[in-house]
Image (cartoon, helix red, strand yellow):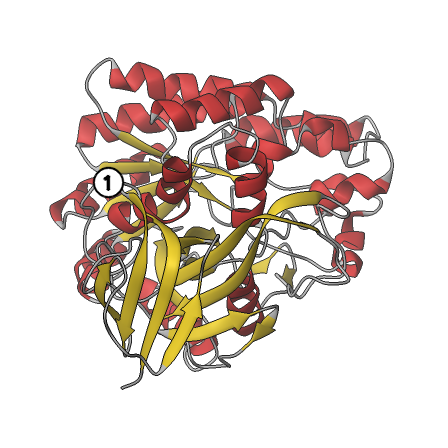
Amino acid sequence: MSSLLIKNGRVVTADSDAVCDVLIDGETIVSIGRNLPVQADQVLDATGKLVLPGGIDPHVHLDMPFMGTFSSDTHETGTRAALHGGTTTVIDFVLQKQGHSLREALTEWQGRATGTAVGDYSFHMAVTDFNEHTRAEIADIVAEGITSFKAFMAYKGALMIDDAQMVGLMQEVKKHGALVTVHATNGDMIDTLVAQHRTQGKLSPLYHYLSQPEVTEAEASGRFTDIANYTGVNAYIVHLTCEGALNQVREATRRNQRVFVETCIQYLVLDASLYQEEFEGAKWVMSPPLREKKDQETLWAGINQGLVQVVGTDHCPFMWEQKQLGRHDFSKIPNGHPAIEHRMELLFSEGVSKGRISLQKFVEVTATNAAKIFGMFPRKGTISIGADADLVILDPKRKHSISAETHHMNVDYSAYEGWELTGKIETVLLRGQVAVHDGQALVGKGYGQFIKRGVTVF
């Protein structure tokens, strides 16, 4: 095994902040301290730089079948782009097909990821058809290290389960100490509004946004937290976007309930003014849609209040040609946007550099909390002896800009074209190997490993 020494960096974790050295032997961290008196095969000087835990993005959709097409990033291209942006581990969603088993879906997703992923990865299991056969499969899925199960409260006829199925899923998942995550929007109300707009000939991307008002998310978030409180299951709301939904979580805390909350980088930095009558707005058609300025303020506050524990991406990119499927009908625009590569730098620039969050809070919401919630801590999400040497070296003062011409995601436009950022990731280590350095990927297809997860330790 080879050794690597990172010297003189400002090493920041969720609970520590000090200038010191980090010694890596093989894939793991073996020593941390000031001026370590050791020799190593490779030395990286991090003077004036930040040394951070590798990011964990627990919400990505790679090579996913959706709305008649597939998301454009594969497990190879998507995890490579993630590495360029400092994210060393992603959790992808396996989607059960209605009428089929969880095992069939898992086998399909394993076939796409195994031997192709460049960065480390794990899976959530999305349950779209909960029945007695599905119930019987859950124990085996958990035993394989997939300890989180997703439910959809929208997309009727494809992904959505009803409240009776939700109760059954939660009760079974709780038996195994696992976690239920949810897409919390009121699918019936959204479908009704979509139909109304289409009947009225209102077909531009603006009406995607207007078909999913805040109440659709707030109502579903409250219903989910109530059912989770009744069943006692570990509960997690994905991609929460708005004040109304977060207020439902606040109410849940009044009865001493714990609900984990994830928002996504786009909801912190983009808003609904991007939705216009012109088709250009299709770039930001995602579900839930972008919200208002007041919702951004609520989410930043929620991070600092500890109500929002994770910032992910819901990375689900489509080529511009694929977005054209909905040029004449917003309901046919594939939902999703590209962000896997930009999450950490955007959050650092807009959050840390602008004084909205602390460095340690940044580490919490980009790495540590996800590792704890999704059963990877302390192997992932921190810098400690015995942990995987997943590390990011970031220059906090270096300025740069985002462009489709320079990003590494397999998509031909950027949702953040021309954005000027402060803070640049220069070197990324994955399990002790320099995976990215100065914009060059140094590990290849198949280097990424499946990460078998335990239960929540948060």
Q: Residue furthest bottom?
A: 1
Report the front residue among 195 and 244. Answer: 244
The percent coordinates of residue 43 (x first, y second) are: 40, 74
Q: In percent of the image, x 46 and y 30: which residue is there? A: 357
The percent coordinates of residue 449 (x first, y second) are: 35, 74
Structural crowding at the residue carrying mark 1, measured as other residues with C-alpha within 10 Å and reported as few (<14), some (14–19) or many (≥20): many
For mark 1, give the secondary structure. helix
Q: In percent of the image, x 44 and y 36: which residue is there? A: 153
Looking at the image, residue 248 lies above or below residue 394:
above
Q: In percent of the image, x 39 and y 41: which residue is there? A: 365
The percent coordinates of residue 395 (x first, y second) are: 54, 53
Report the front residue among 150 and 33. Answer: 33
Looking at the image, residue 233 lies above or below residue 242:
below
The percent coordinates of residue 333 (x first, y second) are: 72, 47
Q: Is residue 79 visible?
A: yes
Looking at the image, residue 179 lies above or below residue 451:
above
Q: Residue furthest left?
A: 175
- Please give left or right for residue 238 compared with residue 381 in the image: right
Report the front residue among 76 and 209. Answer: 76
Looking at the image, residue 185 lies above or below residue 72:
above
Residue under pointer 1: 170
**Where does the N terminus fall, quadrant-wise?**
bottom left
Q: In which quadrant of the rendered view does residue 35 lie?
A: bottom left
Q: Is residue 100 visible?
A: no
